Image (cartoon, grey):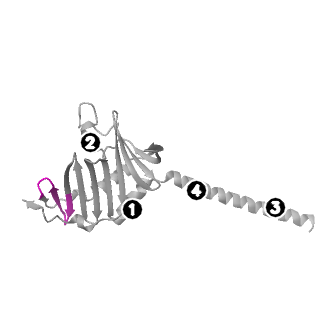
Amino acid sequence: MDKKKKVIIISISAVIALIIIGVTIYFITRNVTESANENKLLKMYEKMAQNETYTISFKLNDDNQYTVSRQGNQANIDIYDDGTRTTDIIKDGNTYLLVYSTNRYYTYNNNDLQLTELINEINDIIQSQEPEKGEEEINGKTYEYLEYKNVSYFLMNPDETVSGGNTSQEDENINTRFYFKGDKLEYIKTIMPNKTELLEVNVSYDVDNSLFEIPDNFEGEQ
């Protein structure tokens, strides 16, 4: 092989190598950028909105927790407030409030506002701002978090937000962090000037159909 051909082959090889390097750098940079810009709360919201079937539980402790289960135009919101249990069943455009201390239920006709309240609130939070991102250790595990400013929707005990029990305080200076392990939301923390509140969260996309039926041992009140 003469010298001229060798130079041509070397030049072509160099160009090919540069192209491969350039393409590799492009895809690496794109993947890093997409990962950095990924909003896991948005991904969760989109799945909830598309399927309209989900169950999300929020737990402060055994006496203070609630679970939202939805399937299409039906929902069940099961609440423990200081140990007192009530349930809202939303179906057929109506809401049925079940009071477990008396085994009675109350019907609110043409009222299904709670059907989409949670998913609408999550969407409002996402649309309101770009979140601050970070990492934090909880119970020995490291989680990625998204923090939204001036958000207090998930606060379970609002009476304790400020000294003196001023429940009229605005959302200002109250922030909320959503903690993810992979794509799974596992904790929500509400951060206030004088305290924090941490909720355990469990998200699934399965719903038990029996949740939308009023138990036989409940009597209706007019």
For the residues marked 4 and 3, what is the alpha-carbon distance in whole angstroms? 28 Å
Mark 4 and mark 3 lie on one chain; the one further toward the N terminus is 3
Residue at the extreme top: 164
- Mark 1 and mark 4 lie on one chain; the one further toward the N terminus is 4
Residue 153, image x, y percentages: 30, 46
> Which of the two marks, 1 or 4, is nearer to us in this view?
1
Judge whether residue 96 is colored magenta: yes
The mark closer to the camera, 1 or 3, is: 1
Q: Are marks 2 and 1 in contact (CB under 8 Å)?
A: no
Between discs 2 and 1, the one toward the N terminus: 1
N-term-proximal mark, 1 vs 3: 3
Which SS class for mark 1?
helix
Q: Which residue lies under the disc numbered 1?
A: 47
Element under disc 4: helix
Q: Which residues are magenta?
A: 88-105
Asked if the stretch drawn in magenta spans residue 31, the answer is no
Please state which of residues 179 and 4 is positioned toward the viewer in this rendering.
179
Q: Amino acid at mark 3?
A: Ser
Residue type pointed to by label 2: Asn
- Mark 1 and mark 3 in contact? Answer it, CB < 8 Å: no
User: What's the mark number on residue 30?
Assistant: 4
Q: In the rendering, which numbered label is found on residue 195? A: none
Q: Tell me the quarter of the image containing the C terminus.
A: bottom left
Task: Give the CA separation, mark 4 to mark 2.
Answer: 43 Å
Residue highlighted by disc 2: 157
**The N terminus appears in which quarter of the rendering?**
bottom right
Mark 3, residue position: 11
Q: Nearer the viewer, mark 4 or mark 3?
A: 4
Crowd tier of the residue under label 3, counting other residues whose Cα lies within 10 Å: few below 14, some 14–19, many 20 or above:
few
Say left or right for 97 vs 3. Answer: left
58 lies left or right of 38: left
